[in-house]
Image (cartoon, rainbow, N blue to C red):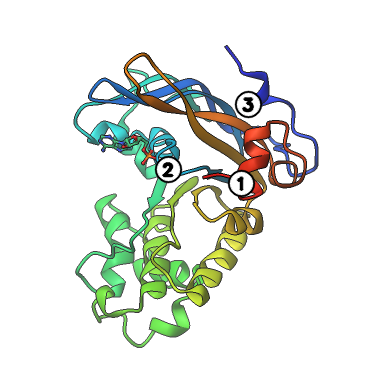
């Protein structure tokens, strides 16, 4: 059932006003029979940045991968509960996981450009999808949207791997948005970047949220406070009879509330740096 701590009504204007993109109900995920995270019930709003925070191992990345069926690619992973995306159960028999992943793109911790040119990195997805329009225009538009165009317009044919780490991560975001997703999932997108590149990505997230719904996993609380409208705090629960501790959603609310007026003592302790 719905956990009142996890789902109580949000209290300020950052709360979703125009419908949920994702509705998660009693979501749990296990690997090889061991529960990694459980009892996740929350609605994620459109054109919002939602941060998933909490100590290492509490299941943040696992929950993120539940949103676009990426966990299915991990042998032994099993997801239960319901994940609705725009009202549709993404695990329903007639849903194509490849289409789910096209609509719900992902950017990873370590920038991972393909070992091809800057241009071909961005053009990869549209070509795969049989894009028939102005590919040059699309590549330029995506590179402009991530603030990379002026830096790479004269080296479009150079390898994406020759860019700096921060540029590579923006290239990966350009690659993700080139297939016109609805949602961009980001799993610790700045953890391999220096502070300046990190700020560039944070600025970019603010710009992208006008067009996309963004869910970001971050271990950096200041980053969550800076970039997100909503925050979900996860932690590890009590040990079961065999000593195993699964992650769980403790509290989900506006970022302002989570950081200044949390309902749960565990959230308050975590954001105050008292544990984790
Ligand atoms: P977080 O992102 O909060 O650090 P994760 O979602 O990565 O947490 O991990 C949650 C739990 O699931 C941890 O106990 C971790 O060891 C386990 N886990 C994560 N990915 C895998 C995997 N591919 N195979 C087996 N166990 C995994």
Can residue 227 be seen in this snapshot?
yes
Q: Which residue is mark 1?
A: 274
Mark 3, secondary structure of its residue: helix
User: CA–CA distance between discs 2 and 1?
Assistant: 35 Å
Q: Which mark is residue 104?
A: 2
Assess disc 2: are there few (<14), some (14-19) or many (≥20) residues with their C-alpha within 10 Å of its C-alpha: many
Which of discs 3 and 2 lies nearer the camera? The answer is 3
Quadrant the N terminus occupies: top right
Residue closer to the observer: 208 or 247: 247
Q: Which x, y percent locates residue 165?
A: 36, 73
Residue 44 vertical placement versus 79 (above, below): below
Q: Position of residue 57 (x, y in %)?
A: 40, 39
User: Counting residues from the N terminus, which is met first, the one under dot 2 or under dot 1?
Assistant: 2
* Viewer-side residue, 81 vs 222: 222
**Quadrant location, ligand no. 1:** top left
Q: Secondary structure at mark 1?
A: loop
For residue 55, side relative to residue 42 (left or right): left
Q: Earlier in the sequence, mark 3 or mark 2?
A: 3
User: Which is more foreground, mark 1 or mark 3?
Assistant: 1
Report the label total: 3
Mark 3 surroundings within 10 Å by alpha-carbon count, few (fewer than 14), some (14 through 19), many (20 or more): many
Residue pictured at 40% horizontal, 58% vertical: 178
Nearer to me, 224 or 209: 224
Tell me the element at label 2.
strand
> Left or right of 272: which side holds 219?
left
Looking at the image, is mark 2 or mark 1 nearer the viewer? 1
Q: What label does residue 6 carry, if any?
A: 3
Q: Earlier in the sequence, mark 1 or mark 3?
A: 3
Residue 47 seen in this snapshot: no
- Which residue lies at the image location 64% right of the left edge and 47% below the top edge? 271
Circles 1, 3 touching at the beta carbon (< 8 Å): no
188 lies left or right of 135: right
């Amino acid at each position: 059932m719905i956990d009142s701590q996890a789902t109580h009504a949000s209290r300020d204007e950052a709360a979703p006003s125009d419908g949920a993109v994702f509705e998660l109900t009693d979501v749990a995920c296990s690997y090889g029979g061991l529960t990694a995270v459980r009892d996740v019930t929350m609605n994620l709003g459109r054109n919002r940045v939602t941060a998933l925070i909490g100590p290492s191992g509490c299941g943040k990345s696992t929950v993120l991968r539940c949103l676009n069926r990426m966990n299915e690619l991990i042998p032994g992973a099993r997801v239960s509960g319901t994940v609705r995306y725009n009202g549709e159960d993404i695990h329903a028999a007639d849903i194509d996981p490849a289409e789910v992943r096209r609509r719900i793109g992902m950017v990873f911790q370590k920038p991972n450009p393909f070992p091809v040119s800057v241009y071909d990195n961005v053009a990869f997805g549209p070509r795969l999808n049989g894009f028939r329009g102005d590919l040059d225009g699309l590549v330029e538009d995506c590179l402009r949207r991530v603030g990379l165009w002026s830096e790479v317009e004269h080296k479009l044919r150079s390898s994406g791997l020759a860019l700096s780490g921060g540029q590579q991560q923006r290239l990966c975001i350009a690659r993700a948005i080139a297939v016109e997703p609805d949602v961009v999932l980001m799993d610790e997108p700045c953890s391999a970047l220096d502070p300046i590149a990190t700020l560039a990505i944070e600025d970019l997230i603010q710009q992208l949220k006008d067009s996309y719904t963004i869910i970001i996993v971050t271990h950096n609380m200041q980053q969550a406070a800076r970039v997100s409208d909503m925050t979900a705090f996860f932690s590890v629960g009590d040990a079961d009879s065999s000593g195993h501790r699964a992650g769980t959603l403790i509290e989900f609310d506006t970022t302002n509330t989570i950081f200044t007026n949390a309902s749960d003592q565990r959230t308050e302790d975590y954001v105050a740096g008292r544990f984790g």
